[in-house]
Amino acid sequence: MQFILKLSTVLLSMVTATLVGAVPTENSVRASETVSKTIEILSPAGCVRIDGVKFCTTSVEHSARATESVTKTIEILSPAGCVRIDGVKFCTTSVEHSARATETVAKTIEILSPAGCVRIDGVKFCTTSVEHSARATETVAKTIEILSPAGCVRIDGVKFCTTSVEHSARATESVAKTIEILSPAGCVRIDGVKFCTTSVEHSARATEAVTKTIEILSPAGCVRIDGVKFCTT
């Protein structure tokens, strides 16, 4: 009888251990270590993918990062391989593109995560300016067209609409406003009002893959990248 009771206790312990061990995900049991990985900065912003595992941050400040594409007039500087955008100097380490002459051109630039880097014609340029490397969401001045039906705007040919009843009563007019291009991609904020587009093309902001040194934290299943804590779901 005691043998049967002891055997039952052992079996119960094994089952309990199995159930407890099944609660954390496979990747939440990683040990604390610092490693170099290629991480993918996802939309919605504030999430990253490392080795196929999705990690998200609860930090409002850092969840505002997105890959933003805007049209700017850039000045290609001497020494070649550097550009100036909005008074900020960006340089590339690409030998091929460092031979460009001095000229001022209009280009579509992609403001990358990590902030402080841009991509122009497939070439990545970065700034050493601390002030400008802290850009998260990009605020730009655009001429927007407030449409009928009211509550919709058109920016660079893209239609954005708000669900705000209060702001859906705006008349049709063209005005210059400072708009904030938001995460999730495909949304903008104008005068505190959030507008979103249903355009697949414009809501499909690219995810940016970058190499970072990440710190795998305890509790396991969390990582720290650039001082920001991300945890896996």
Image (cartoon, grey):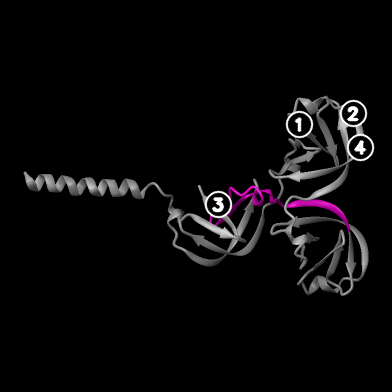
What type is the residue that disc 2 sits on?
Answer: Thr
Figure quadrant of residue 146: top right
Classify 10 Å Cα crowding around label 2: few (below 14), some (14-19), many (20 and above): some
The residue identified by callout 2 is 172
Classify 10 Å Cα crowding around label 1: few (below 14), some (14-19), many (20 and above): many
State which region is magenta.
46-73
Mark 4 and mark 1 in contact (Cβ < 8 Å)?
no
What type is the residue that disc 3 sits on?
Answer: Phe
What type is the residue that disc 1 sits on?
Answer: Thr
Mark 1 and mark 2 in contact (Cβ < 8 Å)?
no
Q: Compared with residue 106, is residue 45 higher up or lower down, i.e. above or below?
A: above
Assign a secondary structure to mark 4: strand
State how far apart marks 1 and 3 are (Cα): 30 Å
Assign a secondary structure to mark 1: loop
The residue identified by callout 3 is 55
The residue identified by callout 4 is 175
Q: Residue at x 68, y 43 (%)?
A: 184
State how far apart marks 4 and 3 are (Cα): 40 Å
